[in-house]
Structure formats: C-alpha cells, structure tokens
Image (cartoon, grey):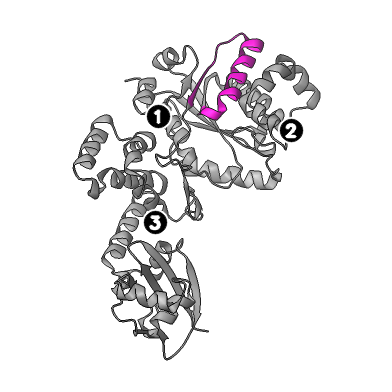
Amino acid sequence: MDVYGEFEWRGLIHAATEGARDALGGEKLTGYIGFDPSAPSLHVGSLLVVMALAHLQRAGHRPIGLVGGGTGLIGDPSGKTVERQLLTPERVEENVRGIRTQLERFLDFDAATNPARLVDNAEWLTKLGAIDFMRDVGKHFTVNAMLAKESVKRRIESEDGISYTEFSYSLLQAYDYLVLHDRYGCTLQMGGSDQWGNITAGMDLIRRVRGAKAHGVVMPLVTTAAGTKFGKTEAGAVWLDPALTKPYEFYQFWLNVDDRDAIKYLKFFTFLGQERITELEIASGAEPDRRHAQRALAQEVTRLVHGGEAVRDAESSAEKLFKGDLRDMSEAEFLDVFSSVPSSQIPFLAEGWAITEFLASNAVVGSKSEAARLIRGGGVSVNGNRIADEKTRLRPEDAIHGQYFVVRKGKKDNFLVRVLND
C-alpha cells in the first residue's frame, strides 16, 4: 500500500489536489507541514498532521517540519473569529524550541536515505523587504481571490473585521512553499482542512513564477462523536509537553474517549495496522466494558509522546487508584494523579474534623445536611475507604503523606483536600 492508500484507509484525506495520489504513489518526493508557534507546546489536535508527516517518512518520502518562527509573528487567521494577540519575538523563539523537541519524537532526522528536516521560516521571512515582497509575491495574487478565501470572508463579515497583517498571512505561507520548493525540491504541502486556501495559494505561486507543479493534501479537523471540541477537557487543552499536561492525565484522556471515537482515533493517532485495529474493534464490540480499543489507544499514543516508562507509570497509578491503594503511591505519583481534580485547603486541627463539616467546608457538598444524606446513601469515600457513619471524624494521622485527603463523591467525582500543617 502506498502512503496515499495508507492515508485513505485511516480516514486522513479530507481533500487533495489533482495528481496528488499519483505523485505519492510514484517516485519519492519531499513534503512539508507547517506548525504555528503560538504556544510553547503542540496539543493533541496537532497530532493528526504530525502523524501524517511521520507516515510520509515511513513510506520513503522526505519530510520537512516547518516551524513558523516568522509567520508566528503575524498570526494565521484560519479558524479564528478574532484577531490574535501578537507575540514578542522572544516568546515565538521560545515556542519554536519547544515544538522542535516534540517533532523529534516522531521524525527520524538521522535516516540514511530520507532524513527528516526541520526548518524555521524566520530564516527568510525576517530578512524579506516590503518592496521586494510586494513586487515578487504580491504581484501574483489578486485581492479578489484573497477576499474569496473562507478564513478571510468570515472575518470580514464579523464585527471586528480583519487587519491587513492577518489578511496578508496567506501570501507569507505561499512564499514559504516557494522557498522550500527552490531549496529542497518540495512539491507537497499537507495540513488541516482549514489550510486548504493557504496551500493552494502556494501551489499557484510556484506555478506562476517557476512553471512547476506542486500538490496539496489536507486532513479532516478532528471532532468528537459527542460534538465537543477534540483535545479539550475541563482542565483545558491537552498538551504534548509533560509540564503542561501530566503523562497520567494524558493517558487518561485517551483511555476515556467515547466508544464511538476509539476506533477512528486508533487509525488517526497510532501506527497500528489494519489487522490489529480490526481485532480491537471486534473485541470492543464483544466486551465494551473492557475498553480494549481505548486501552490500546492510551498505551500507543502515550508511548509515542512520552515513552514506555510513562505508560507503565500511568497504568500503575490507575490500578492503585481503582483498587483504592492510594497509600502505596509516592507523593510525586499521588500529586500527578490528582493534579487536575478540584482542590482546597483546611487548617490543621489536632482533634480532627467531623466528616459532615469537612465535606461542606471544602465544597464537596453544599451543606452538612446534604453531606449526611450522601453518607447514608453510601456515596462518600475518603482515601479509598467508604464512610458509613455520618458521625465519623477524620484525624490528622489519617491523611496520606501526612497532609492529603482524597474525597470521592459518587462513582467518579474526586476532590483533593490538603491539610495546612504550618
């Protein structure tokens, strides 16, 4: 199977230009994807195009990861309803470094025959003069065509409009494609479906000034079966940087995806083949409560992003949490597991705390009477132990690592209460 066929069965093709299939099925080519350094890390939504670039290299083609150190100073209006806040050059440079490190986990920059290449468009865009740019690039684009782009049209129709800065963004991206074509023989650009207009602009520029043919392939924007935005949780975006999203939280994100999404995400975000994914689909249908597909998804993606040790640690922590063995966790492991749950603090009391007051004062419930009703119904546990008596008192020595209480309300709602010992 050539890489275009690989993309098709995985559902990665949203649209492609005429001739892209034949180009990818023929001689080895050079293709690129651009990454916007608007944050210090990529998020899980970016994984789709990262995987596409990795598939490209695995099929023998030459991949280029373009980090937008130059375009990041402007901001891409695609998919945005309001003007972006401009970042300082120092912040963009910092973000570029973080993204470069993450791409190195997926691409082989030392391959013997088709090594990946990482470039930063700040190298040429920051040296480009305004007059030269308008003569050499702007001359080849009509305002009519630029106004017809969906990303521009939506913004023009909005109350805030669009600045000339962001209006010009597609010309900068088109120029990137031309530079990569000239320097590295790049004839393919890929990206999310919201990049279609920018990609075709680059193809047109190459055709006009070089008389050459270039191609474009765009991937679908990922959605969830429930209609929510992919990659968002109550705690915010799910990042690839372990300092922003703990590996345990990252693992749990994938483990908890909707049954309706699990197989699709296995195709999107892992290198598992058709046979293995079909096996997981059959097993999940036969035993939905075992979450075979989600477990494989969590293992594979966490391994790709954070390594095998992170998978083992996440599964070990999950097992201890499920069994209620919270005291077996190290303090660091404990804090990782509960880093995103609601938390509060309570002053130290040598005599301890009445359970109903403890629950009410830490916003687990709205009142002491509600706490009592919940306890009578068997709906409260503390540090893995069910509270059966509403007159129970928690003692300081009951705290995990001398200062933590984990309260579970119902089956899934966890709260972390820290005792202030000072």
Residue range in magenta is: 191-218
257 vs 129, nearest the viewer: 257
Q: Position of residue 100 (x, y in %)?
A: 53, 41
Q: CA distance from mark 3 to mark 2?
A: 40 Å
355 vs 303, nearest the viewer: 355
Going by the picture, which residue comes out furthest to the left? 286
Circles 3, 1 touching at the beta carbon (< 8 Å): no
Amino acid tagged 2:
Thr
- Left or right position of 299 against 402: left
SS category of the residue bearing label 1: helix
Is residue 79 shown in magenta? no
Q: Which mark is residue 165?
A: 2
Q: Which residue is mark 1?
A: 55
Q: Position of residue 404 (x, y in %)?
A: 42, 75
SS category of the residue bearing label 2: helix
Amino acid tagged 3:
Tyr
Instruction: Identify the mark nearer the N-term, 1 or 2.
Output: 1
Amino acid tagged 1:
His
Residue 131, relative to residue 316: is it above or below?
above
Residue 346, relative to residue 325: is it above or below?
below
Quarter that holds the N terminus: top left
Residue 167, relative to residue 385: is it above or below?
above
Q: Main secondary structure of the magenta part?
A: helix
Q: Which residue is mark 3?
A: 248
- Left or right position of 265 against 100: left
Circles 1, 2 touching at the beta carbon (< 8 Å): no
150 vs 125, nearest the viewer: 150
